[in-house]
Image (tube, rainbow, N blue to C red):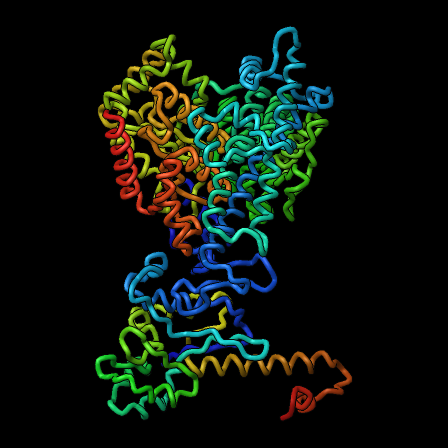
Amino acid sequence: MAIKTFDRATQVLIDRAEALGIETGIHRLESQQPQCGFGQLGTCCRMCYMGPCRIDPFGEGATMGVCGASADTIVCRNLLREEVGGASSHVGHARHVVLAFKKMLNGEAPGYRISDRDKLMEVARGLGIEIDGKSDMEIAGDVADKALEDLSRQNGEPMNWLRLRAPKREFEMWRALGLLVSNAHNEIEEAMHRTSMGNDADPVNLLFACLKIGLVDGYAGLHLATDFQDIMFGTPRVRTVDANMAVLEKDKVNIAIHGHNPVLSEKVLEFASKLEDEARQAGAQGINVVGVCCTGNELTMRHGVPMAAHNLQSEIILLTGAVDAMVVDMQCIWPSTTKISECFHTKVITTEPFVKIPGASHVSFEPEHADEEAEKIVRMAIDAYRARKGEDVVIPKEKSVGFAGFSIEAILDVLGKIDPSDPLKPVVDNIVNGNIYGAVGFAGCPSIKLRDTSMTERMARELLKNNVLIVTTGCTAHICAQAGLMDSSATDKYCGEGLKAVLHVIGKAAGLDVPLPPVWHMGACVDNSRIASLLGALAERLGVKISQLPVAGSAPELVQEKAISIGTWLLALGLLVHVAPSPRILGSPVATKVLTQELEGITGGKAYVELDPEKAVEGIMAHIGQKRKALGI
Amino acid sequence: MKEIFIDIERCTACKSCEIACSVQHSKSKDLFTAISEFPPPIRRIHVEKALSYSYPSKCMHCAEAPCMMACPVGAIYRDTDLGSVHVNKDRCMGCWMCAMVCPFGAITADPYMKVARKCDFCRKRVKEGKKPACVEACPTHALSYGEVDDLSKAQRLSAAERVARAVSAAGEERKITPLKMLRDMGGV
């Protein structure tokens, strides 16, 4: 028996895996114990072939690498490379979307169109593009070119998306600190260059480079992706969704769509509805598309597709035997999925030429042939259903409901019903009077190391009790949805009196029969851009810097390098960023001191490591309390 | 009685045993806290290099321990339950006789306490039914924990299998006898 135990739905399937002799992540984690101390502290350097070198954290052995690099240098170089991994993922994602958009404009990708003209115009105006007398397609072309400039400019001018989306006060602060970035690809190249053997050895200089990569991630990754996705596929509106693995249906063709990029998932969803008849002819009652991980969130936000599973459950959901096809694109795809799929009739279908997994079927998905390829993928799922029909499946019963779709536009829409001339007024007034004591943005993944402690849920419930509103994205949103925290019933169940009253009033004003939920689903992990926009709007409305707001960020269950680069962006914006487990910085006294203390005097940002959920909330509450006091509220 | 065995062919020099040993001998028993403790915890296992091999060197808890015999003040004693060899730090006067006679270099000096330090067999852990920290930390099983008779039995079986495979591979013609095989392997 595995030592850790998880939520009921997950545990049922882990038990099934054990009964069937199938290995899951929890077993693999066990066999990795104990994990390397040098790795955890960040003091292992593999940058050159005089090494690998390790610094003895207890000071008995080596204090420097062969080249003379100290623990500080090694830790900061390693951290910067993690940042690059994260930022490259987001910039790569955004670039895929922009290129698909560009192909659409050139008539080369007929499967796509502009869905949100308003957002296109908002972005175009923000970028300073001349609109009068131009067709939508011409304007869209200019917008795409502005985006591609951020991946090609060589003159050192700040990125267009940094000018477009960065809050004004923070933009000026970054200018003064020399942090403004010009071209995402150049910054990524320079970060790889400066961390290779014999370049930057100054830990503080390297930490500043980390902040720059944070900005690359935030603006050339997250914001860029969100903006183009909204223009192409629509800006999310508030809607209700079902969550957890129970959204699978035994008698339907179940397509679990997993990964990050809606350029694929939107088309699969479209063709699933077009091929319903074929599924019926195969003996199914229809086709059921469900979302896993962040491309699931994309479909949830725009179409209300059920949130079937977070990243940790991406292999677990296959143990139901009820998934006919798991269609994946990029990021967070565990290679174990194909191993488990072999035990059932499940087809794992990879679609990106740069993301292939042994044992998967590969359908190379290109925007030019999106319709044909999406059709082919859905047909593969129907075929898999034919093979699966009549076999035993185990679908856990636990299911929750909740609200999703809290884009900035949707939030302002809801709040605008109270005061159309000043939509943020109800939020600002209630922050000032203390009904909303503060707000916390939850982002990140489910950690297999912390999931058994319900780290995210316990932190969320504790914050709500203290009248702290929560906004969330990514797989953390799946966790919150499964825990029922996105349902309106959670408002009365978990919130303190102040927050409860506010959510009732807003819910009523929005024309809902129920209060708004206390945890707002703002999208996929790239949509942390939406959280930053909300913070920017609040700070602007109050005339203060983001670092002065009574808010904090938290990655309660850190897994991915992407969380490191997003977190660093939030540090640059001036937020307290809680994280668990610890980033690999503790082997460096300089990195630890700068990130957890001294940075606060520079950007206002501060990293805060705490693995105990209740203590973490205490730390966050103390921080919010200080910010309120400083604002005189 | 159980012992800690070392398989030099499996050691990758990752030094996980060293870290685990330091953490085990810290106050907090937690890596992230232990690195900033003072006095710093002192490890009792050292990965050393010889030819192209690495070797996690530690006290072998000898059945006839030279360090015990050499200690002029009787500071080194045996745990009768575990058979392991320990230093009584209150008696130790730091003369280093033990270090001079130890064939394994297993004695290190504690610079803060001015006494001899050596592997304590993770006595508390072992009595709780756990493996010694270094054994638990070793990702390649270069360190193992068990009875000497079991180790020898496993090595006998492994030798027997090697011979049997060679003989059976020789097939019908039987040109290789077990004796020849043993000679080819380096002599009888």
Relative to B121, is A340 above or below?
above
Relative to A223, is A207 above or below?
below
Out of A568 and A516, give the one closest to the viewer: A568
Q: Position of residue A446 (x, y in %)?
A: 43, 42
Q: Position of residue B54 (x, y in %)?
A: 53, 75
Q: Does the rendering let one see residue A24? A: no
Relative to A521, is A617 above or below?
below
Q: Does the rendering let one see residue B179? A: yes
Compared across the picture, whether A241 is left or right of A469 comes to right
Out of A264 and A345, give the one closest to the viewer: A264
What's the residue at 38%, 74% (across, down)? Answer: B44
Q: Position of residue A158 (x, y in %)?
A: 56, 29
What's the residue at 29%, 69% (across, down)? Answer: B128
What's the residue at 41%, 56% (across, down)? Answer: A587
Q: Position of residue A322 (x, y in %)?
A: 54, 37
Residue A143, by quadrant, is top right
Please count the marks in the image. 0
The quadrant of the image that shows the N terminus of chain B is: bottom left
Residue A10, by quadrant, is top left
Name the residue at the front extreme: A176
Name the residue at the top extreme: A133
Residue A459, by quadrant, is top left
Compared across the picture, whether B77 is left or right of A261 comes to left
Out of A174 and A271, give the one closest to the viewer: A174
The quadrant of the image that shows the C terminus of chain B is: bottom right
Compared across the picture, whether A44 is left or right of A145 comes to left
What's the residue at 69%, 36% (across, down)? Answer: A363
